[in-house]
Every structure is written in C-alpha cells, then in structure tokens.
Image (cartoon, coloured by chain):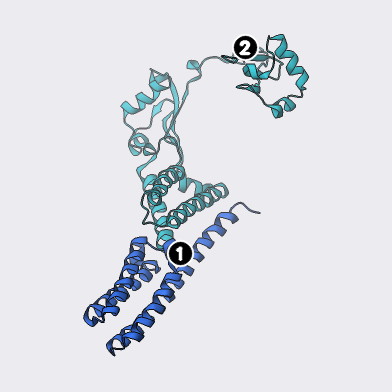
Chain colours: A blue, B cyan
Amino acid sequence: MKAWLIPTAILAAICAAAFFNCRVMESDADRWQSQLEETESAALAEDWALARSTLSHSYADWTAHQAYLHTVAHRDEVDNAETMYRRCAAYSLETDLSEFRAEMAGLKQQLRLLADMERFDLKNIL
Amino acid sequence: MTTAFFRTVILYFFIMTGLRLTGKRQIGELEPSELVLTMMLSDLATVPMQDFGVPLIFGIISILTLLCFSTLLSHLSLCSVRFRELLCGSPTVLIDKGVFLQSALRKNRFTIDELYEELRAQGISDPSHVKYAILENSGQLSVLQWPAYQPPSADDLKRTVKDNVSIPTVLINDGRLLSKNLQKCGKPEAWLAKELKARGFADHRAVFLFTLDDHGNIFCIAKEGVS
C-alpha cells in the first residue's frame, strides 16, 4: 500500500467525523429546542403538569447525550446548559412563569450556541 | 471539531509560509516543516492536558491533522523536486570560489560578523582559505576550503592505508548479555564465556561493556562494585 494512503485516509476520516458531528449537534439542538417550545407553550397555558412532564422528557433526552457532548463540545458550555435545565425545572415547580420564561429563553439560546460552535462556517474558523 | 480541524490546517500553512519567508536563519537545525511540526505539537498537547474544559479530542484531532499533513507533504516533496524547493527552499551559496556574494548575504540577512563567527566555529580564521560557503536549508553553514588549506588525505600523499575501520558490536551491556548481537557476530556463548574467563570474569554480570569488531578486537570494561 502506498505510504501516502494512510495519512490521506486519516485526514478524510477526521473531516468526515467533523462534518458528521456538525449534523448530529444541529439535529440534537433542533430536537431539544422543539421539546422546550412544547414545554413553554404548556407553561403559557398554565398547564404546569404538562410543562414539567415535557421538560423532564427533554432533560432525560439531554442527559442521555452527556457523554457525547462532553467528548465533542466545550465543557463549560455543556455545564451551563445543564445548570439552565435544572433552573427551569425548579421554576416549573414554583410555577413562576416570568422567571421560567426568562430561563427557558437562556436555555434555548445556550443549546443553539452549542450547535453553532460546531457548525462549519467562516465565522467559527476565523 | 470542524473548527479545530480547519484552524489547524490554516495555522500549519500560515506558520510554514512565515518561516519560509523569514529565511533560513530562523530555522536552526531543522527543516521548516519539521520545525513547524515540533513547535505546534508541543503546544497543542499541553492545551487539553492543562485545561480540563477543552475536550481531549480537540487536541487529538489537531495533532493527528498535523502529523498527517506533515507526512503527506514529505511524500510530495519526495515525488517533486519543485515542491520540495517550495517547501524547504534551496541551499544558498554565500562564498563562491572565494568570492563573497554580497547580494546573497544581504538576501539571507547574514552579516559579515555572523559569517566570520560561523567560519571560526569551524576552525577557519582566514576567510581567504574558503572556496565555498553554503547556507543549507537547515540554516547551517557548510564550508569547503581551497585544497591547499585542507589536510592532506592518504590518497593525496599517495599512500596505502590499512582498512581498519569497523563498527564494534556490543555483546554485554551493563551486565546484560545481548544474545541477538552474539548470534549476529556468529559466536557461540561458549566463546564468550571463554573470553570472559580469560579476562578474569566469572560471568557476563560482572562486565559493564564488552564489544567485538569485525577484526576480532575485543574491548572490555569491568562493572564497578561487582567482584
């Protein structure tokens, strides 16, 4: 086998893995955001039981991806989102709508940031 | 991950271009690609090592990318002379047949003082003794003197000399017997035991160094503190 094939194959594999990671992060962030949208709608309708249930479902989904997220994303950003999830859960228990909505907006923004950080674009590279 | 990958690629080529533009003087003993690799690898490895917030994979991706690029570039430079010239540059003659090429000195930012320093470091005090001085890609200066100032060789003196140059093979290293080397020399262990006995050693554990060359010459040092 030609000696240049191995480095070329490794570079291609890194590139493919990097783009695959972009896609995964993007789709995960979209899914979590839609789950949170559902939670927010329930909270706006004062249906706190449904809001807590959908939030808990979203948090379980988020927790299932922790190992992956800690491997590919900056840990500070992942930990920030985790803290926000917990705060949202606490506000949903208190049924404090204004604080809940503010925290929810921050959480959605944080999840978007996680996906944006992995996106392949000039802004990130530069 | 994509950011880490593309940033590594961009910075690798950026530093490489920078080093090629700053000239051979900045390089030292390594070629530009080797220097860039050494510089970047050491720094890249320390980031995920010290900052636990940065995933380990960021460091691994960057290091793997650098190693792969470096291997690919060295293969390309083997295939194409022009590419090699672009990547590593070409040697520059600073003194040609005793003539100082001032434009070449200026281009490489080599002052007369530095040239003298290099010549003195090679044991040459008089620059008129130099026929050629070449600034190599690695940044080192190769100096060739006029034949009149070079020490005469046996061939110059029309004398025949006995070929007694050979590489000694280590058979015992710090009390350890190197059986592979012994086999390579075509000697049985019994021969070694006999040679050791003749030198007053009970076995190989009492020997610090034992070598044998192609001409059968043996060099033996006893190990300290072992009787």
What secondary structure is found at the residue carrying circle 1? helix
**Percent position (x, y) of residue B18?**
36, 48
Q: Is residue B164 left or right of residue A82?
A: right
Residue at image position (69%, 17%) is B203
Give how far apart the Cα atoms at labels 2 and 1 are.
Answer: 60 Å
The N terminus of chain B appears in which quarter of the rendering?
bottom left
Could you tell me which chain the residue with mark 1 belongs to?
Answer: A
- Where A53 sits versus A71, above or below? below
- Where A31 sits versus B30, above or below? below
The C terminus of chain B appears in which quarter of the rendering?
top right
Q: Nearer the viewer, residue B141 or B97?
A: B141
Residue at image position (68%, 9%) is B200
Q: Which mark is residue A67?
A: 1
Residue topped by disc 2? B227
Marks 2/1 same chain: no
Image-quadrant location for residue A70: bottom left
Instruction: Say which amino acid is labelled 1.
Output: Ala
What secondary structure is found at the residue carrying circle 2? loop
**Percent position (x, y) of residue B209?**
61, 18
Could you tell me which chain the residue with mark 2 belongs to?
Answer: B
**Percent position (x, y) of residue A119?**
39, 69
Q: Is residue B211 left or right of residue A94?
A: right
- Where B89 sits versus B159, above or below? below
Instruction: Say which amino acid is labelled 2.
Output: Ser
**Percent position (x, y) of residue B58?**
43, 57
Residue at image position (37%, 36%) is B25
Residue B222 appears in the picture as rendered:
yes
